[in-house]
Amino acid sequence: MKPWIYMLAALFLLAALPAVASAAPPAHNYDCSDTTPTAYDARVDQAAMYYSSSSSTNAHASTAYGQFRSDAVFFFNGHGLYYDDSHKGGGIKFSSESWILADTDGHYPGNDRYYITDYGTDIRDVLLAVYLACHTSHYNPYNGDLLQQTMNKGADICLGGFDGEVEVENGKCWSGSFWDRLRNGETVASAASNAKDDCYLHWPFGYHGVDTYEISGSYNSCLTPARYGGVY
């Protein structure tokens, strides 16, 4: 083979390398119990924004906790933590009474528990985490604050959930509108606020908790172009 052919072959190989290295940022979406099909709908909108998105129903917390480390986008729709003594917040419930919790002071709900506080800097590549569940932005003296711990561990934006009780159908409505608006180029803050208003006339009429969301971080950013967090 002549030298110029070797050079041409080398150029083709170099041109192919960026395509291999630039895989689409992953997005994982979780529905638990009666919240379907929000995870699937979010997956479709994220794929349109060129994320490598997936969805699952009734996953175990260990699966979500492990995948969180590689995520650009993490979305959970399900149930939040509430103790019989009225302390609430700090956790999201997956299948088999497994939990992702902000922290613990010795209170251990459910069967299996995984803690945001144990991540170190493992989730520094997360661009957006969304916890759509009751009381998920509420500080719990037993299990801490999901929003704050998620931000402490390096996420760019956390819609740290909702302080009040979110009615299931209104939560589904909010999710559908939120991800659709992000796909159409709105900022996270704008999409969250407008999704809330979109759901006011959705049955059952009223906000029913979707107006109690809290958000922290670079929330005036868009999800496009698809990327990891920490990239400015």
Image: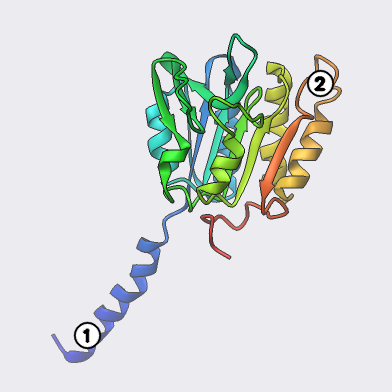
Q: Position of residue 131 (x, y in %)?
A: 60, 32
Q: Is residue 95 above or below residue 180?
A: above
Q: Amino acid at mark 1?
A: Ile
| Closest to the observer, 68 or 120 | 120
Q: Earlier in the sequence, mark 1 or mark 2?
A: 1
| Closest to the observer, 120 or 199 | 120
How far apart are labels 1 and 2 at the CA level? 65 Å
Residue that label 1 marks: 5
User: Split into 4 quadrants, where in the image is the C terminus?
Assistant: bottom right
> How many numbered marks have been drawn onto this rendered protein structure?
2
Does 143 sit left or right of 186 as displayed? left
Indicate the quadrant where residue 98 lies. Answer: top left
Residue projecting furthest to the left:
1
Which marked residue is nearer to the observer: mark 1 or mark 2?
2
Label annotation for residue 164: none
How crowded pointer 1 is (Cα within 10 Å; few <14, some 14-19, many 20+) is rated as few
Q: Is disc 1 placed on a helix, strand or loop?
A: helix
Q: Is residue 213 above or below residue 229?
A: above
Instruction: Name the residue located 57 percent from the left edge and 20 percent from the top edge.
Output: 81
User: Split into 4 quadrants, where in the image is the N terminus?
Assistant: bottom left
Q: Position of residue 78 (x, y in %)?
A: 58, 22
Q: How is the image coloured?
A: rainbow
Q: Amino acid at mark 2?
A: His
Indicate the quadrant where residue 65 lies. Answer: top left
Instruction: Name the residue located 80 percent from the left edge and 26 percent from the top edge.
Output: 199
Q: Is disc 2 placed on a helix, strand or loop?
A: loop
Label annotation for residue 202: 2
Q: Position of residue 181 (x, y in %)?
A: 72, 42
Does 229 sit left or right of 19 as displayed? right
| Closest to the observer, 224 or 144 | 144
Tags 1 and 2 in contact by the CB under 8 Å rule? Answer: no
